[in-house]
Amino acid sequence: MIILKSDREIEIMRQAGRISQMALDAVRKSVKPGVSTLELDMIAYDVIKSNGAIPAFLNYNGYPNSICASVDDEIVHGIPRADRILEEGQIISIDVGAIWGGYVGDNADTVGVGNISDEAKKLIEVTRNSFFAGLEFCKEGHRLGDVSAAIGDYAESRGYGVVKDYVGHGIGQQMHMEPSVPNYGKPGRGVRLNKGLTIAIEPMINIGTYKTKVMPDGWTVKTQDGSLSAHFEHTVAITDGEPILLTEL
Ligand code: MF3
Ligand code: CO
């Protein structure tokens, strides 16, 4: 069942989203060689708590931290660690969520550590652009398949691997709700987009294969071929006009 939100609920979600983006922004600004992924986690935790919110990931299905920090060939769900020290030239995907007023905001971005290769820069750009290609269809009159197809086609037509094992999701009073939001699909299929639908759209794009593997820690997901992966996510509200990015400052 899909739960549509009232304007009042969307306003609350905007605040939850704003806090999520503040945490993501603070982490983004702290990424540099020599910093551990656990330090980044603590920065996000502090921003979320000092704004009166709750880290959405912490203890979610037993997840141990407030952010996911996925480096290089790690796609998503990288667990922060004190001994995971960032090095020049790496890329890191940071995913963070906050609960405020009973509603969840969820967002992610990928940034370079110091100077990065042109191919890494291109991957990050394509991933970000694929999100915005999908966002174009986040309007009443379209279906979810239009959004999914736009994202997947954008990245695949440029030769990238589009992750299929993990998808975006409906979001509201819980982080993961219906409908699921794949980054691939067929135009004209899937649920109709109506005002009040709130979804987390999160393309995960690889330079090589789309295939994934889960590490022995039970969380960290990597590319099967060791190629670099990037992740970009916003929580989005469908309106009767343009979509709202709820996870914006
Ligand atoms: N954005 C991720 C997702 O939607 C965040 C979940 S990480 C978890 O799946 F650790 F909380 F599960
Ligand atoms: Co998400």
Image (cartoon, rainbow, N blue to C red):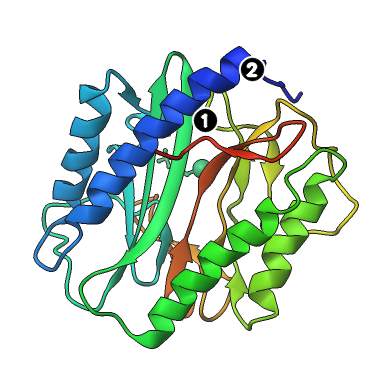
- The residue positioned 86% from the left and 57% from the top of the image is 187
Please provide percent x and percent y for residue 179: 71, 36
Asked where in the image residue 190 lies, by quadrant, the reply is top right
**Name of the residue lying farthest toward the right:** 188
- Which three-letter amino acid code belongs to the residue tagged 1? Met
Q: Quadrant of the N terminus?
A: top right
> Are there few (<14), some (14-19), or many (20+) residues within 10 Å of tag 1?
many
Q: Can residue 173 be seen here?
A: no
- The residue positioned 80% from the left and 37% from the top of the image is 193
- The residue positioned 13% from the left and 48% from the top of the image is 39
- Whether the residues at callouts 2 and 1 have beta carbons within 8 Å, the answer is no
- 5 sits left or right of 58 in the view: right
Residue that mark 2 sits on: 7
Q: Quadrant of the C terminus?
A: top left
Please provide percent x and percent y for residue 214: 45, 59
Between 196 and 190, the residue placed more toward the observer is 196
- 180 sits left or right of 97 in the view: right
